[in-house]
Image: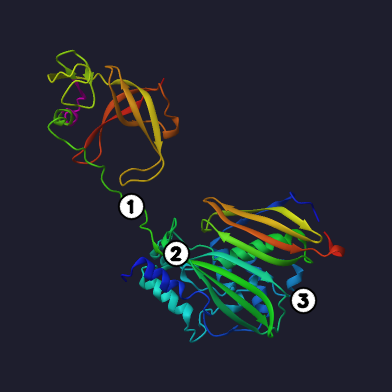
Amino acid sequence: MEMRADDRQARLASYEGLPAAATGTGRDPVNLPMIRHWCEAMGDTSPAYRGPDAIAPPTMLQAWTMAGLSGHGDRSGPYVELLRLLDDLGCTSVVATDCEQEYLRPLRPGDTITFDTVIESVSGRKTTRLGTGHFVTTRTDVRADGDLAGTHRFRILKYAPARTKAPAGRRPRPVVNRDNAGFWQGVAEHRLLIQRCTGCGTPRHPWLPGCNACGGLGWDTFEAGGEGTVHSYVVMHHPPFPAFDPPYAVALVQLAEGVRMVSNVIGVPYDKVRIGMPVRLEFAACDDELTLPVFRAVAA
Amino acid sequence: MRPAGSELPPLEIPLTRTLIVAGAIASRDYQDVHHDPGSARDKGSPDVFMNILTTNGLVGRYITDHFGPTAVLRKVAIRLGVPNYPGDTMVLTGRIEEVDGDTATVRVVGANGLGTHVTGTVTVTVPEEARP
């Protein structure tokens, strides 16, 4: 549904303060079998929940109001409408985030449960780990035989699921142009070519049209021997990119010939990469079309 | 009542598939993500996961197990973090934050292999004559 952001927020906020639905009635009065099933599931062996003076575990408060598999019948009302509106806005998933309960008096077998729920608030659009959506907070007064027995504040996030883990994509392609085509041609032939100024003899990397030392435009190349050391490195944790599996180390490798290049260090866990670590050039085939120079840690 | 700052002994809860399903059904929560792995996967979750009512029940049990059957829960407020999936273990820990007469406020944290599943605050009254 297309809706301007402020229109959307105003429409969502218009539900604040409205009763969620007409007064509800618990499907069953408070009863020992449901209490026993609850205690069995929770592993709760407290004697307070057994015998002639049994009370219900206070944390069961919401359970007495649940519609269960057969539902509450027609529970249409503002809450159902609000959830439908959020569905229409793309927020089709739901997760409970908060539950605050206050217990005013114990519930005992035989108590008849009624409850009233008010929509307390609808948040602005929030981006969470799960996706982007709106928090909806309700407050329910639970009555036992007509007396207020507890209150129950409940918050859900209605959200549009974030795309789960990106498909394992291909490694990004290098941008090959006239200035660096020779470098990539060398890599394809498993030769790491270093550019060298024909004016002053200074080697340079990455490939550039001119010399940083003397400004000379003439150049030739020579092949690197493959020996190097880790000059510096970072470990990438976030964000994840397709074809990369964080965490991984990205190193600035100092080649024996005097230039430095950014690459990956392989053959060692990401957290064992160290400055000064000796490494040796290898060529890694990423897929059918792409080969990259990488550096393998050399056992000291 | 132990003084503010005291730690409660931790409680380890093995997160079996049975616990997750039994808790959902005992709380009358038939959302399929709490009992049907296929539906859970369709909705982007790797497996079924514990519903908030079960977490709430376990937090309540942690407190009443410790303070005994005469303890009266006044308030339980929880916030969920990472999900409780089958096969993991949740460890509940607690710390008494405040004591006011016979009433204590306890900060509870439940952590699993993925991180913090639940943080919360429980207010509990333990009548004078029935202290453990």
Instruction: Please identify, in this view, whether the residue under mark 3 or under mark 2 is nearer the observer.
Output: 2
Marks 1 and 3 in Cβ contact (< 8 Å): no
Badge 3 element? loop
Type of the residue with mark 2 = Gly
Q: Residue at x 39, y 74 (%)?
A: A85
Tell which of A67 and A3 is nearer to you. Answer: A3
Tell me the residue that label 1 is attached to: A166
Tell me the residue that label 2 is attached to: A124
Type of the residue with mark 1 = Ala
* Chain letter for mark 1: A
Q: Which residues are magenta?
A: A186-195
Tell me the residue that label 3 is attached to: A51
Image: B97 above or below A201: below
* Chain letter for mark 3: A
Badge 1 element? loop
Tell which of B49 and A62 is nearer to you. Answer: A62
